[in-house]
Image: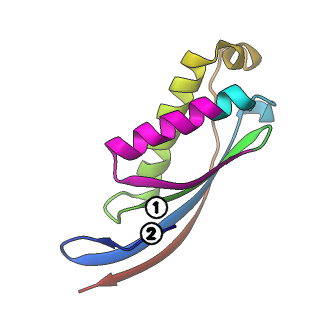
């Protein structure tokens, strides 16, 4: 559940719905990839001011519902998530790299911002 994030000059609930399809819409998401993805996302949450409220995988794309602080732009949030998850999935699950011809996992993304911010 999302909570108010209180900083020195604002109080916010800033939510991002991020959808990342796999390259070429290949069917690469399975139980093993899902477990690695969840582990990596929990590591990201510990390192950055990003809270993962929900993570959902389909066969060829991933949905994230994340909460962050206003000092992180949507582009920065997506860049952090995509780069770290892709690197770890390709390293830990070699079959995904084989299915993508040794290439990248994510190329495109869609972001929808849901927010309530009060400045004082």
Q: Where is residue 16 drawn, in percent x and y? A: 53, 62
The numbered dot on residue 2 is none
Q: Is residue 47 left or right of residue 3?
A: left
User: What is the spatial separation of the Cα atoms under label 2 and label 1, in whole angstroms?
Assistant: 6 Å
Which residue is more in the foreground, 98 or 46?
46
User: Which corner quadrant of the image does residue 114 belong to?
Assistant: bottom right
Which residue is more in the foreground, 16 or 109?
16
Q: Residue at x 40, y 58 (%)?
A: 73
Q: Which residue is mark 2?
A: 14
- Tell me the colour scheme of the image: rainbow
Q: Where is residue 92 drawn, in percent x and y? A: 57, 18
Which residue is more in the foreground, 47 or 117?
47
Where are the magenta residues, as a range? Answer: 35-57
In reply to whether residue 103 is colored magenta, the answer given is: no
Outermost residue, left side = 8
User: Which corner quadrant of the image does residue 69 belong to?
Assistant: bottom left
Q: Residues within 10 Å of mark 2 (few under 14, many from 20)?
A: some
Q: Where is residue 61 drawn, in percent x and y? A: 73, 42
Q: Is residue 16 left or right of residue 7?
A: right
Q: Where is residue 57 drawn, in percent x and y? A: 71, 43
Q: Residue at x 47, y 33 (%)?
A: 84
Placement of 112 over or under 26, stated as above or below: below
Mark 1 residue element: strand
Sequence-wise, the earlier of marks 2 and 1 is 2
Placement of 104 over or under 13, stated as above or below: above
Q: Residue at x 63, y 18 (%)?
A: 93
Mark 2 residue element: strand
Q: Which residue is mark 1?
A: 67
Asked if the residue under mark 1 is in contact with the one under mark 2, i.e. CB atoms within 8 Å, the reply is yes
Quarter occupied by the C terminus? bottom left
Q: Residue at x 72, y 20 (%)?
A: 100
Q: Is residue 30 left or right of residue 3?
A: right
């Amino acid at each position: 559940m999302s909570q108010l994030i209180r900083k020195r000059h604002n109080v916010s609930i800033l939510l991002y719905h991020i959808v990342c399809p796999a390259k070429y819409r290949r069917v690469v998401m399975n139980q093993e990839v899902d477990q690695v993805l969840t582990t990596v996302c929990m590591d990201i949450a510990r390192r950055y001011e990003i809270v993962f409220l929900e993570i959902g995988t389909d066969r060829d794309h991933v949905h994230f519902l994340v909460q962050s602080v206003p000092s992180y732009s949507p582009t920065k949030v997506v860049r952090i998530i995509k780069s770290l998850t892709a690197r770890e999935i390709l390293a830990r699950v070699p079959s995904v790299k084989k299915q993508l011809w040794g290439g990248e996992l994510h190329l495109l993304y869609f972001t929808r911002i849901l927010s309530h911010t009060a400045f004082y």
